[in-house]
Image (cartoon, rainbow, N blue to C red):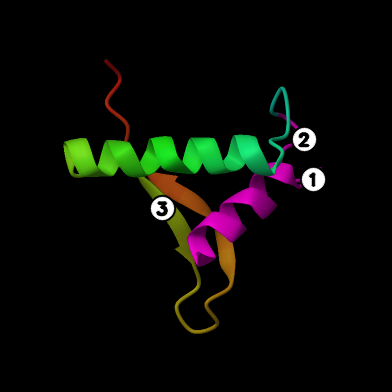
Amino acid sequence: DRDRDLFYRINSDERVMEFFPFRRDRAAADAKMDEFRAWIAEDGYGFAAAEIIETRQCIGFVGLLDPD
């Protein structure tokens, strides 16, 4: 689906991930997306793609995470 493709592109982009310790391949990005969706199903909140409303251009992802 659209969010999954965007999440992979963000997580595999060299420039975006410059200050992260690693970039995710497709399998790792899909696994992380599954984890994020499980958090939303369990807790009612989590992470999602962020986009510009007018153009639907993806600009990253945002969300809430329980620190515990």
How far separated are the C-alphas under marks 2 and 1?
5 Å
Task: Determine if the magenta segment contains residue 13.
Answer: yes
Marks 2 and 3 in Cβ contact (< 8 Å): no
Residue 40: which quarter of the image? top left
- Name the residue at 47% across, 60% down: 50
In the foreground, 22 or 32: 32
Q: 26 above or below 56?
A: above
Mark sitting on residue 15: 1
Give the numbered dot on residue 55: none
Q: Do residues under tags 1 and 3 come within 8 Å of each other at their CB atoms?
A: no
Callout 3: helix, strand or loop? strand
Report how many numbered discs are placed on residues in the image: 3
- Residue placed at 31% from the left, 38% from the top? 38
The magenta segment is 1-19
Q: Nearer the viewer, mark 1 or mark 3?
A: 3
Q: What amino acid does circle 2 point to? A: Glu
Does the residue at mark 2 contact the one at mark 1 (Cβ under 8 Å)?
yes
The CA distance from mark 2 to mark 3 is 21 Å
Which residue is disc 3 drawn over?
Answer: 48
Q: Nearer the viewer, residue 41 or 57?
A: 41
Label whose residue precedes the other's in the sequence (1 or 3)? 1
Amino acid type assigned to the residue bearing label 1 in the image = Arg
Q: For mark 3, does the 10 Å Cα neighbourhood hold few (<14), some (14 to 19), or many (20 or more) residues?
A: some
Residue labelled with disc 2: 18
Q: Is residue 19 left or right of residue 56?
A: right
Q: Position of residue 24 (x, y in %)?
A: 69, 36
Mark 1 → mark 3, Cα distance in angstroms: 20 Å
